[in-house]
Amino acid sequence: MQERQIHRQREKATWKKIQKTELSKLKSAQHHLWFNVLAYFLISVVEFYLAIVGHSQTLRADALNNLSGIISAVLLLIGIFIARDVDDDDLIGQPLPDDLSNTGQRLQLTRFHYETVFTMITGLIMIAISINVIYGGIKSLINQTNQEVPKPITLVGAGIAMVIMMIVWWFNRAGGRKLQNAALIAAAQDSLSDALTSLGTMVAIGGALVFKVAWLDGVASIIVGIFILIAGIRIFRESSLNLADYFDPEAEKQFKQAIEQWSEVIRVEELNAHYSGNMVTLDIVIAVDPHMEVKDSYRLGEEIESQMLHQFGIVDTDVVAVPGQ
């Protein structure tokens, strides 16, 4: 009994250390996202103003695209705020029973899901904005009498947006890799897409100015809308798969191979990996010698859990041993 208590205390200390590290990463991710908000806000204001002054449908579409970046960053900030709210003993007003170890691990892992939830909402908002942009582009093509060749000043807006987006992309990519944060990695992909969209906007406006083709502006805005749609669908798909408990089969195969290298493990009967925000947990059922003593199977489970933590960064591994044949 004393040995078990010592183990539980050690396990609790390990979880607290992991939790502290993850919360520190989320705090750093918040700083990156605030930078995103400021950058996207500046770009949106400049592009909206120049789109009105310069009569450019494409620049307006790019401004709406960058507006979705503001919404995306704010939603992710809300999700991270909930995930970091360790002083709250419930979940959005609803109590959760303490887990058996009284570490609060179950509650915290559940909170981490909110980062993914708000990422999925971001994808939906991007899809809605893309539909609006595509509709506006089609409408402008149908009503060609109202079309105008954009003014040269609109090139300045697209150029400013592209430069700032490249800075944001580099900042997010560096932060996402350093912190191993899915929200920042997704934000980096989004900002690179936005930079390329702004580049496309520059090319479209430049083409309309050089060749004096008014309809090119409307066509370009539709293309921008399609880019936003693709990015929104990608973000929605990845986050919804995580929430639906989907996990990469190749990664699960690696976990299984690592566990089956233990001489005491006859085979892995079941293996299920789960995402909790950016953290991974694992449930496994292993077949062992039917005559193995309980204390030995318990020790094996703890050693496998330690291996999964240090080799793959899996924060919690639940091991169930069953008699093998």
Image (spheres, rainbow, N blue to C red):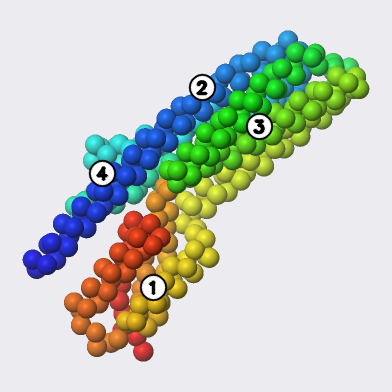
* Horizontal arrangement in the rendering, residue 35 relative to residue 57 (left or right): left
Label 4 sits on residue: 95
Image height of 303 relative to 40, above or below: below
Q: Amino acid at mark 4?
A: Pro
Mark 1: which amino acid? Ile
Q: Which residue is mark 1?
A: 259
Spatial CA distance of label 1 from label 2 is 46 Å
| The C terminus - image quarter | bottom left
Element on which disc 4 rests: strand
Q: Earlier in the sequence, mark 1 or mark 4?
A: 4
Camera sees residue 133 = no
Identify the amino acid type marked 2. Leu
What percent of the width, then of the height, locates residue 292? 24, 84
Pointer 3 residue: 195
Seen at 66% across and 17% down, the residue is 48
Q: Residue furthest top?
A: 53
| Cβ–Cβ under 8 Å for marks 4 and 2 | no
Residue 134 drawn at (x, y percent):
74, 32
Asked if the residue under mark 4 is in contact with the one under mark 1, i.e. CB atoms within 8 Å, the reply is no
- Name which residue lies at 54% across and 27% down: 70
| Three-letter amino acid code of the residue under disc 3 | Ala
